[in-house]
Image: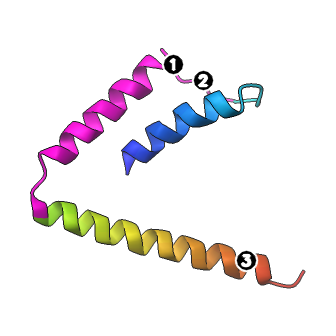
Amino acid sequence: MQHILHLSLLRLRKKEPNTIRPFRVPFYPILPIIGLICCVALIYYLSNTAKIASLGWGLIGFAVYFVMTRMHKTKPV
């Protein structure tokens, strides 16, 4: 899931350039792009079993996230 982190960093820096950020990524945008390429290369070399397992756990994580955010939004204040 690190590739999602690298993509979100690139997207948020372009979408919201004036946001105050307490941490600046060194060598931006070169370092996040290199990290993204490395993550994709590592995913390529995984076995099919590992790819399926990580996809399954990722889907479970996203489902839990969406259920929890929906429960939080409907909670009375």
Distance from the alpha carbon under mark 2 to that under mark 3: 31 Å
Instruction: Give, as a three-letter code, the residue at label 3.
Output: His
Distance from the alpha carbon under mark 1 to that under mark 3: 35 Å
Alpha-carbon neighbours of circle 2 within 10 Å: few (<14), some, or many (≥20)?
few
- Give the quadrant of the C terminus: bottom right
In percent of width and height, residue 20 lies at: 76, 29
37 falls in the magenta region: yes
Q: How many marks?
A: 3
Instruction: Select label 2 or label 3 by which is in front.
Output: 3
Determine the residue positioned at 76% across, 31% down: 19
Q: Are marks 1 and 3 in contact (CB under 8 Å)?
A: no
Alpha-carbon neighbours of circle 3 within 10 Å: few (<14), some, or many (≥20)?
few
Q: Magenta part of the protein: which range?
A: 22-48
In percent of width and height, residue 29 lies at: 49, 20
Q: How is the image coloured?
A: rainbow
Which of the two labelled residues, at mark 2 and mark 3, occupies the earlier sequence position?
2
In percent of width and height, residue 16 lies at: 72, 32
Which of the two labelled residues, at mark 1 and mark 3, occupies the earlier sequence position?
1
Q: Are marks 1 and 2 in contact (CB under 8 Å)?
A: yes
Identify the element where label 1 is drawn.
loop
Q: Are marks 2 and 3 in contact (CB under 8 Å)?
A: no
Distance from the alpha carbon under mark 1 to that under mark 2: 8 Å
Residue 53 relative to residue 30: left or right:
left
Identify residue for label 2: 24
Identify residue for label 3: 72
Point out the residue furthest to the right here: 77
Identify residue for label 1: 28
Residue 41 relative to residue 23: left or right:
left
Residue 23 relative to residue 62: left or right:
right
Determine the residue positioned at 9% across, 57% down: 47
Image vertical order of residue 27 relative to residue 75, above or below: above
